[in-house]
Image (cartoon, rainbow, N blue to C red):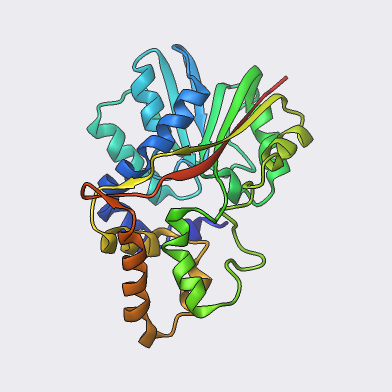
């Protein structure tokens, strides 16, 4: 996707408005990826498609002064939010740089580890992006990814699924971004293998995905920040939004427990070693 898609003003406003609750919702996915990647003291880490800063900020916090983390994204506006979050945490080992995953602005064999949380699904050319990662990774370095599992899980079915049931048509634009591109077990492994990564590992895992607030909030946040589903949302007649919003919030309500919305998230974790 282009930088403009990910950096649209509506998305930036929502990213800022909901950054604390959104970070809380994504914390367990971030932690799962960080534990999976297992960054070590002294490493130089590249985080690709970092958006507002995860897992780069969590890794930088974990490494402290014994390591360095570079967050990259197409959107300089989202990276500005990441930089502010890092400043608030007084992270001196964190930096952000606008970059396209398909043409990384770093010398060969620069990084000891690469990560990407919910970014790999949106690479326009996965083979080229993985080849670039291999170029900038040192021999023996790992690339670690978190991707969405199937659409058929509570977070998506109770939100986007309700809209789809009402308006019909395709879930996603035929040539548009697909959050579920690597939901099929083994598909991310195949992409890593095709570009020369070795010692590939992949697993599907369900982790907490909890919104600390009301159904109306998480639905507003999702509608604002989701680029892949914009064509679907645009098919909703204006006069139908009040009814559909009510149906969505009723579906989300089913997942409330102790004043939190506990969806759970089924994700794919995969990694490969640069030989």
Quadrant including the C terminus = top right
- Could you say where residue 246 lies in the image, as x and y percent from the top left? 31, 74
Q: Nearer the viewer, residue 29 or 129?
A: 29
Picture mark count: 0
Image quadrant in which you'd find residue 136: top right
Relative side of 144 to 85, left or right: right
Relative side of 164 to 175, left or right: left
Residue in view at x 38 percent, y 24 percent: 60
Quadrant including the N terminus = bottom right
Residue in view at x 28 percent, y 60 percent: 215
- Could you say where residue 191 lies in the image, as x and y percent from the top left? 72, 39
Residue in view at x 55 percent, y 56 percent: 151
Q: In the rendered image of this protein, does residue 216 appear above or below residue 266?
A: below
- Could you say where residue 274 lies in the image, as x and y percent from the top left? 69, 23
Q: In the rendered image of this protein, does residue 177 appear above or below residue 210?
A: below
Relative side of 186 to 36, left or right: right
Q: In the rendered image of this protein, does residue 268 appear above or below residue 237?
A: above
Image quadrant in which you'd find residue 84: top left
- Could you say where residue 178 lies in the image, as x and y percent from the top left? 60, 57
Q: Nearer the viewer, residue 147 or 6?
A: 147
Viewer can see residue 201: yes
Residue in view at x 55 percent, y 28 percent: 114
Viewer can see residue 13: no
């Amino acid at each position: 996707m282009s930088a403009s898609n990910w950096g649209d003003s509506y998305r930036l406003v929502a990213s800022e408005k909901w950054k604390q609750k959104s970070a809380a919702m994504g914390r367990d996915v971030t932690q799962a990826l960080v534990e999976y990647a297992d960054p070590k003291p002294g490493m130089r880490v590249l985080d690709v498609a970092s958006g507002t800063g995860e897992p780069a900020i969590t890794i930088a916090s974990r490494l402290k002064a014994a390591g360095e983390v570079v967050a990259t994204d197409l959107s300089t506006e989202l990276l500005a939010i990441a930089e502010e979050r890092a400043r608030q945490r007084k992270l001196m080992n964190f930096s952000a740089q606008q970059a396209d995953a398909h043409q990384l602005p770093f010398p060969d064999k620069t990084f000891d580890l690469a990560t990407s949380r919910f970014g790999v699904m949106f690479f326009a050319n996965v083979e080229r992006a993985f080849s670039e990662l291999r170029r900038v990774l040192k021999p023996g370095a790992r690339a670690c990814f978190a991707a969405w599992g199937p659409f058929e899980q509570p977070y998506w079915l109770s939100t986007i699924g309700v809209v789809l049931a009402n308006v019909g048509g395709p879930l996603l634009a035929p040539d548009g971004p697909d959050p579920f591109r690597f939901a099929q077990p083994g598909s991310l492994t195949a992409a890593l293998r095709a570009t020369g990564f070795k010692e590939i590992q992949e697993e599907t895992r369900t982790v907490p995905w909890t919104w600390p607030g009301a159904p109306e909030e998480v639905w507003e946040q999702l509608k604002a920040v989701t680029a892949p589903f914009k064509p679907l949302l645009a098919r909703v007649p204006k006069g139908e939004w009040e009814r559909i919003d009510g149906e969505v919030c009723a579906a989300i309500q089913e997942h409330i427990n102790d004043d939190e919305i506990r969806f759970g998230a089924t994700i794919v974790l995969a990694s490969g070693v640069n030989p």
